[in-house]
């Protein structure tokens, strides 16, 4: 059994179920030199935030123990501190990265962990870090109306903003221009970077898949050209005051609220269940 030889928090997961220690009606992350149950392969989660921690995946859930209970990562938001929740998200991503980077993608040799977030191939020297993708979200505005895409390609229908992933070799501004052109036909003439949201996304139907995405939020108030038929759905100009009554992505609701409050720039982190949108 692995131990840490020092006091630390233990973020143990069975699938996406985090193990919490229960005391009366409060829940905490197990803390001690040894993990609360035997684990075979543990990873260090860096502790620049002052919370020394290790994480591991459990082969079987901890059951029939009054002291410990499993809880979904998202549900744990309501029960543990914000610092522990963020750490749990990081631990979960590290486990995912670890299980998906065991072999070098260049030469196939078994990789070696060199740092909490770096692996190296002993044969060819290839270095690997957890990957984070960047995407843009653009709110095109005209007077008191907002341009939304009424998307048909999900379960149910959603009103969404123009969105897309940053492509290789592209700047964020180029991505904003391209996505708006592709989805609406408009050529932007003025836009503004308004915020950065870090999405931690749990994919559906999967054991531990979770990825991180930096969503760069823009507003655009100037454009030329004519609208085109959009592949993603129908374009709709919606009055500002009607937007929050529509079926929207959770992240978009936060964006609209902050814009209504005239927030000049904002940063935040949101955990979401996967609703693939880009
Ligand atoms: Zn290699």
Image (spheres, grey):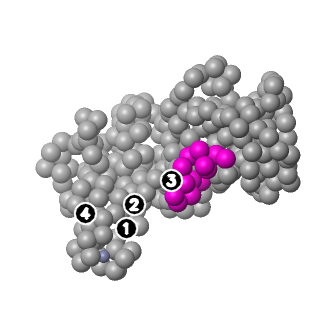
Cα separation between marks 3 and 2: 14 Å
Cα separation between marks 1 and 4: 10 Å
Label of residue 133 in the image: 3
Among numbered discs 1 and 4, the one appearing first in the sequence: 1
Cα separation between marks 1 and 2: 6 Å
Label of residue 113 in the image: 4
Q: Residue at x 68, y 22 (%)?
A: 260
Location of mark 2 (residue): 97
Do the CB atoms of the residues marked 1 and 4 lie less than 8 Å apart? no
Left or right of residue 111, residue 105 in this image? right
Q: Residue at x 34, y 48 (%)?
A: 11
Location of mark 1 (residue): 101
Examine the rendered structure and indicate whether residue 156 appears above or below residue 126: above
Q: Give the secondary structure at mark 2.
A: helix
Q: Residue at x 85, y 41 (%)?
A: 236
Q: Give the secondary structure at mark 1.
A: loop
Q: Nearer the viewer, mark 3 or mark 1?
A: 3
25 is within the stretch colored magenta: no
173 is within the stretch colored magenta: yes
Q: Residue at x 63, y 36 (%)?
A: 218
């Amino acid at each position: 059994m692995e131990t840490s030889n020092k006091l630390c928090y233990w973020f143990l997961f069975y699938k996406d179920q985090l193990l919490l220690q229960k005391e009366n009606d409060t829940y905490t992350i197990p803390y001690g030199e040894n993990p609360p149950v035997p684990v075979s392969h543990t990873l260090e989660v860096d502790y620049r935030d002052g919370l020394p921690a290790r994480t591991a995946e459990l082969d079987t859930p901890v059951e029939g123990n009054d002291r410990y209970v499993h809880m979904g990562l998202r549900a744990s938001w309501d029960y543990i501190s914000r610092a522990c929740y963020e750490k749990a998200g990081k631990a979960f991503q590290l486990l995912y990265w670890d299980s998906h980077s065991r072999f070098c993608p260049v030469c196939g040799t078994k990789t070696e962990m060199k740092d909490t977030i770096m692996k190296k191939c002993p044969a060819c020297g290839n270095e690997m870090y957890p990957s984070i993708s960047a995407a843009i979200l653009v709110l095109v505005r005209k007077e008191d109306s907002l341009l939304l895409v009424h998307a048909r390609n999900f379960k149910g229908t959603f009103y969404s903003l123009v969105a897309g992933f940053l492509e290789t070799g592209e700047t964020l501004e180029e991505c904003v221009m391209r996505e708006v052109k592709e989805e609406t036909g408009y050529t932007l003439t003025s836009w503004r970077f308004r915020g950065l949201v870090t999405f931690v996304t749990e994919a559906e139907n999967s054991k531990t898949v979770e990825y991180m995405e930096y969503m760069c939020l823009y507003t655009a108030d100037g454009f030329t050209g004519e609208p085109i038929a959009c592949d993603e759905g129908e374009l709709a100009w919606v009055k500002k005051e009607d937007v929050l009554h529509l079926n929207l992505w959770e992240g978009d609701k936060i964006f609209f609220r902050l814009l209504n409050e005239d927030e000049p720039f904002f940063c935040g982190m949101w955990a979401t269940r996967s609703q693939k949108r880009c």
